[in-house]
Amino acid sequence: MNQQPLPGASATLTWGILSIVLTLVCCGPFGAIFSIVALSKAKTAEKLYVQNPESYTDYSNVKTGRILAYIGLALALIGLVLLILYFGVIAAMVASGEFAT
């Protein structure tokens, strides 16, 4: 049987890697957006693979991309929580008068 690469498998892996890199290097919202795109591409590729598994290769790229997207999304959410806490502490210090400018 002639197997072909799974459409969307390499794209899922690429978006998953970009989600982690952009979360750590640039900023969290871009990483979260790329994570969501990777998860939607993974869902589409998985549906295609489940319909006819013997026709496609590279399903491992879909699983790896999904894991990387979840990691990127978790890092983005942790960064968002830390950012909210940071500005919350600053706002509390300003409100209490301990932060003199």
Image: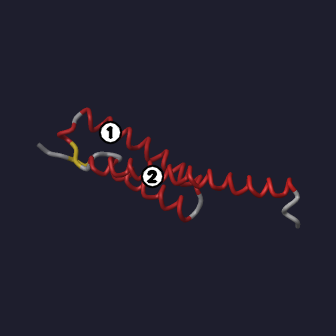
Q: Position of residue 60 (x, y in %)?
A: 27, 50
The kind of secondary structure element at disc 1 is helix
> Does residue 1 appear left or right of residue 83 in this picture?
left
Closest to the observer: 38 or 23? 23
The kind of secondary structure element at disc 2 is helix
Q: Earlier in the sequence, mark 2 or mark 1?
A: 1
The mark found on residue 37 in the picture is none
- Assign the N terminus to one quadrant of the image: top left
- What residue type is disc 2 on? Ile
Q: Residue at x 80, y 53 (%)?
A: 92
Q: Position of residue 33 (x, y in %)?
A: 54, 49
Residue most extreme to the top: 51
Query: Which residue is tagged 1?
Result: 46
The mark found on residue 71 in the picture is 2
From the image, state whether disc 2 or disc 1 is nearer to you.
Answer: 2
Q: Position of residue 5 (x, y in %)?
A: 25, 49
Marks 2 & 1, CB-CB < 8 Å contact: no
Disc 1: CA contacts within 10 A as few (<14), some (14-19) or many (>=20): some
Residue most extreme to the left: 1
Q: Position of residue 94 (x, y in %)?
A: 84, 57
> Does residue 51 appear left or right of residue 21 in this picture?
left
Disc 2: CA contacts within 10 A as few (<14), some (14-19) or many (>=20): many
- What residue type is disc 1 on? Glu
